Amino acid sequence: MAATVDCDVMMAPVEPEKSAEELEREAEAYKEKGNAFYVQKDYNEAYNYYTKAIGRTGSKRKSHQFEDCSCKNASYYGNRAATLMMLGKYREALEDSQQAVRLDDTFVKGHQREGKCHLTLGNAMAASRCFQKVMEVEPNNEQTRLELKNAAAVLEYEKIAEVDFEKRDFRKVVFCMDRALELAPACHRFKILKAECLAMLGRYPDAQSVASDILRMDSTNADALYVRGLCLYYEDCIEKAVQFFVQALKMFPDHQKARLACRNAKALKAKKEEGNQAFKEGNYELAYRLYSEALSIDPNNIKTNAKLYCNRGTVNAKLKKLDEAIDDCTNAVKLDETYIKAYLRRAQCYTDTEQYEEAVRDYEKVYQTESTKEHKHLLKNAQLELKKSKRKDYYKILGVNKTASEDEIKKAYRKRALMHHPDRHSGATTEVQKEEEKKFKEVGEAFTILSDPKKKARYDSGQDLDEEGMNMNDFDANNIFKAFFSGPGGFSFEASGPGNFFFQFG
């Protein structure tokens, strides 16, 4: 049977309970060290020693070996509050300053620091109450008098911003919030309102930056999640936006703005996709209706609405409603001045409606933004069409299209030459005779150019015919007329004075 061995267990010595006086001396020593570090701007170390001092006062309370020394305890909390303020931890500083004045309601610095924390966090009304208490004790305290003015200014900026937000004057709200944040730099509420207005103004990177800064400090902030989603929503990243709206609603189920934005985002995405599908299937009437319905969902979503207008413009172009297509593209670029696709679509519609100057302007805008070979080619073609449009349109003069055959050109000339021949209008007024003579000459010019393959090719390519050695002023319309109608079955002419002919059918 094994022998039983007795073991001596070494017990840690019990530290004798310290007297209230000893604890108080230690607390004061920690406070002095904290003060030294505070002066050196080593706020982390200062915080640690003030915390130790507060801990010693806690030990005194447990021991019940001390007389009431609330004033000293209040100073420890007050000093730690000052340190936390220097570290930018205003919420923790507010708790310490409130504890300080609970311990000693006559502690002026405690009230000052509580007021400053309230003001920095954006609670100007509470800040005013704290500063008023200081003024009751120290009526000549100029610093507190200034802080009271600052608190009043913040309240005024809040009031103005609330009215302007209702008026949708978002620039003014941003201005007010910037001024308020100079006095209340740690106020999340002001930052969120500013970020929301920045998003409404289309300044998405700025708005996202503000919201992201808040989320880094508080990932559960529903307002910041909403603003992040709002920016994505307005940038046409609708799926990602919905995720943020849903997350915001998880944090705060009664967040009405997030709920409305989430509903609009889902409806907009669905309607746009339905319109795209109808377009792909060639059902343009349905696509037009769906895009129109999508445009009515949220007028504030500028970027998505710009795309919807451009899509509807494309539908109108397919339906040969070119004026309506131009209007839609114009609405698109009004919403988004950088929208290249809308400029290109409108430029094509301008070309199709022979509004060449407008087409050139749009292509120039595109080429200045994106200097690609394709855009350069489009611009050159538009400039060529503009140049051609400023010359006489020989096809229009003859009443034929640009693909007319040689026989069609001859028939058109025969018809127009006989229609405008001066002898046919010899009994008309002088003005009419001059106008018909001019048209007769233009018909001859048109026939001369379009009946000659080489001249026609140069004309179609936009070359200046005068530069090619063909002066249009040198044409004799009568000679062309004679040459065309000469031969069997033609016409016979007798001169009856300069520029006048009597003709008869053969």
Image (cartoon, grey):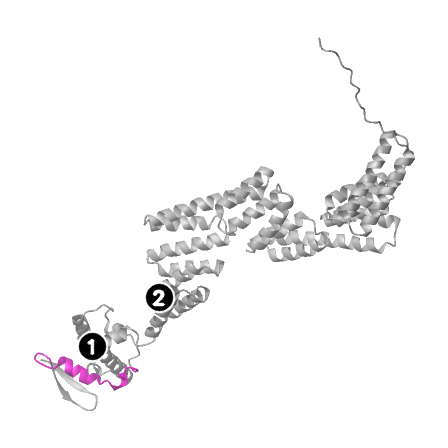
Q: Which residue occupies 65% across, 45% down?
A: 217
Q: Which residue is outermost to the left? A: 488
The image quadrant where one finds the C terminus is: bottom left
**Mark 1 is on which residue type?**
Asp
Q: Which residue occupies 58% across, 48% down?
A: 227
Q: Do the residues labelled 1 and 2 touch (CB within 8 Å)?
A: no
Q: Please give the residue where the numbered disc 2 appears in the rendered image.
A: 351
Between 84 and 356, which is closer to the camera in this rendering? Answer: 84
Q: Which residue occupies 81% across, 49% down?
A: 38
Q: What element carries label 2?
A: helix
Between 195 and 315, which is closer to the camera in this rendering? Answer: 195
Q: Quadrant of residue 370?
A: bottom left
Q: What stretch is highlighted in magenta?
A: 466-490
Q: Is residue 473 magenta?
A: yes
Between 324 and 108, which is closer to the camera in this rendering? Answer: 108
Q: Nearer the viewer's eye, disc 1 or disc 2?
A: 1
Q: Where is residue 71 in the image (x, y as percent from the top left)?
A: 88, 41
Dot 2, how many residues are within 10 Å of its Cα: few (below 14), some (14-19), or many (20+)?
Answer: some
The image quadrant where one finds the N terminus is: top right
Q: What element carries label 1?
A: loop
Q: Please give the residue where the numbered disc 1 appears in the rendered image.
A: 452
Q: Position of residue 237 (x, y in %)?
A: 49, 49
Dot 1, how many residues are within 10 Å of its Cα: few (below 14), some (14-19), or many (20+)?
Answer: few
Task: Describe residue 148's horizontal placement relative to residue 465 as left or right.
Answer: right
Q: Where is residue 393 in the image (x, y as percent from the top left)?
A: 29, 74
Task: Describe residue 403's horizontal placement relative to residue 361 as left or right.
Answer: left
